[in-house]
């Protein structure tokens, strides 16, 4: 059985995209092993998932980081900060080296890098082990929230290594065009962030868990609570919309700021937060809402070119959607008439479209019905064959070189 080594820069606990790809390839006759990061007390060093997928994790910090974490330097604050930065860099290099060694010794036929922070490690492991390289660019990391400091480094890495990959993948057509033009490579395979198809009957999970007293519609946002997602805007808008609950599921850097804003706006009865839930439980939460919202802002190309997990998760659950009018999002919502589009320039468009759905039960029902129809086409099963075909082409080229 041919081995595939996937590498991620996370604990591999809630990475839906990677899990779907691993399951598809495992079911197609490959032995998939995911190399990830280990956090003591949170994850296992090694485990085997029910489908037979192996997961191997390496410590996410070098040994000396753990032993020196509590040691306070006697030098000044600037020197301390410089010393900490050097230790962080060396620790990260140690982790990448550990991943590279484990993957090299694994002797896979394909090393599959997920996102740019794993690409150099995957490329080196592939070179040392004689494997083929597949790269899945989940994001446009040269124009992404929080990546401004690393833009030149990211561009250099991708420009150098993407042309050397035997297979390249991304998430939307806009991103595929960008990468092809930026790095002079063939158009990437597009695999959208679609969930697996399921028949999601409506549930009362959110209503029961939060003990919501009024029969108002529930507007749900699920995903990272991060900058540029339009979440401050969503809370400001919610303050002007009566007769609806707003529920945010997920975690991130903005969690505390958003909770504080909720207090300042006097929204504790109508705006609620649920921490990140396991992937297996998420569909039941989604199906207990009435409207899905994606108020992402035009702060970078990565946002402008997205469609996102949550949009497809809303569709699979049969929710009407209000989302920002960006090209890839528009391609999903408009042809299937499953929701409303709001301009990204101010609060008012989002308020207007949310109010339409909140105040019009018949419109919600129509959009929900259309979403359920669209779900039969906009699911992972409808595109996974393209991933298998990519692997067949990559390995066929390998066979031609080594008959």
Image: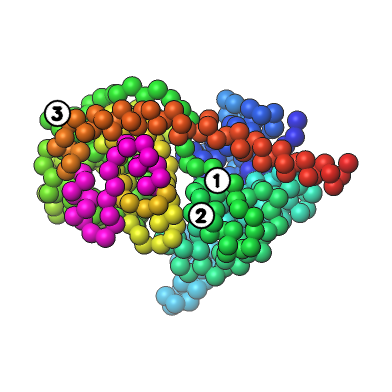
Tell which of 212 and 229 is nearer to you.
229
Asked which secondary structure carries label 3, the reply is loop
272 sits left or right of 299 in the view: left
Residue 332 inside the magenta-drawn segment: yes
Q: Which mark is residue 215?
A: 3
Q: Identify the coloring.
A: rainbow
66 sits left or right of 299 in the view: right
* Contact (Cβ within 8 Å) of mark 2 with mark 1: yes
User: Within 10 angstroms of label 1, few (less than 14), some, or many (20 or more) residues?
Assistant: some
Percent x, y for residue 67?
54, 56
Residue 112 inside the magenta-drawn segment: no
Q: Which mark is residue 43?
A: none
- The relative height of residue 292 versus residue 133 in the rendered view (above or below) is above
Q: Which mark is residue 175?
A: 2
User: Within 10 angstroms of label 2, few (less than 14), some, or many (20 or more) residues?
Assistant: many
Write the start and end of the magenta stretch as one range.
329-354
Q: Which mark is residue 190?
A: 1
Asked which secondary structure carries label 1, the reply is strand
Furthest residue in direction right, as rendered: 403
């Amino acid at each position: 059985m041919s081995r595939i080594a996937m590498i991620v820069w996370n604990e591999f606990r809630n990475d839906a995209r990677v899990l779907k790809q691993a399951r598809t390839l495992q079911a197609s006759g490959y032995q998939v092993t995911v190399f990830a990061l280990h956090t003591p007390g949170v994850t296992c060093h090694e485990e085997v998932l029910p489908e037979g997928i192996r997961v191997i994790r390496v410590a996410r910090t070098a040994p000396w980081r753990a032993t020196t974490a509590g040691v306070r330097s006697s030098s000044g604050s600037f020197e301390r900060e410089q010393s900490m930065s050097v230790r962080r860099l060396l620790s990260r290099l140690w982790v990448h080296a550990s991943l590279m060694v484990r993957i090299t010794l694994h002797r896979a036929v394909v090393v599959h890098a997920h996102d740019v922070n794993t690409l150099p490690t995957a490329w080196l492991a592939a070179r040392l082990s004689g494997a083929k390289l597949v790269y899945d660019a989940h994001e446009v990391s040269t124009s992404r929230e929080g990546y401004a400091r690393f833009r030149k480094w990211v561009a250099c890495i991708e420009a150098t290594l993407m042309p050397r990959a035997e297979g390249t993948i991304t998430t939307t057509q806009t991103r595929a065009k960008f990468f092809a033009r930026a790095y002079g490579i063939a158009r990437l395979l597009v695999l959208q962030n679609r969930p697996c198809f399921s028949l999601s009957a409506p549930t009362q999970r959110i209503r029961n868990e939060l003990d919501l007293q009024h029969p108002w519609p529930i507007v749900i946002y699920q995903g990272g609570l991060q900058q540029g997602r339009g979440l401050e805007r969503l809370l400001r808008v919610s303050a002007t919309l009566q007769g609806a609950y707003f529920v945010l599921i997920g975690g991130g850097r903005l969690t505390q700021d958003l909770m504080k804003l909720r207090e300042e706006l006097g929204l504790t009865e109508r705006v609620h937060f649920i921490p990140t839930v396991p992937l297996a439980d998420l569909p039941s939460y989604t199906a207990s809402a009435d409207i899905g919202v994606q108020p992402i802002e035009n702060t970078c190309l990565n946002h402008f070119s997205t469609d996102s997990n949550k949009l497809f998760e809303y569709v699979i659950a049969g929710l009407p959607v209000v989302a920002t009018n960006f090209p890839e999002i528009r391609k999903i919502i408009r042809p299937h008439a499953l929701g409303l589009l709001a301009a990204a320039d101010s609060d008012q468009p989002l308020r207007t479209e949310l109010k339409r759905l909140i105040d019009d039960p018949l419109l919600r029902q129509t959009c929900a019905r259309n979403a359920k129809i669209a779900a039969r086409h906009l699911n992972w099963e409808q595109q996974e064959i393209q991933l298998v075909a990519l692997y067949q082409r990559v390995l066929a080229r390998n066979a031609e070189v080594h008959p």
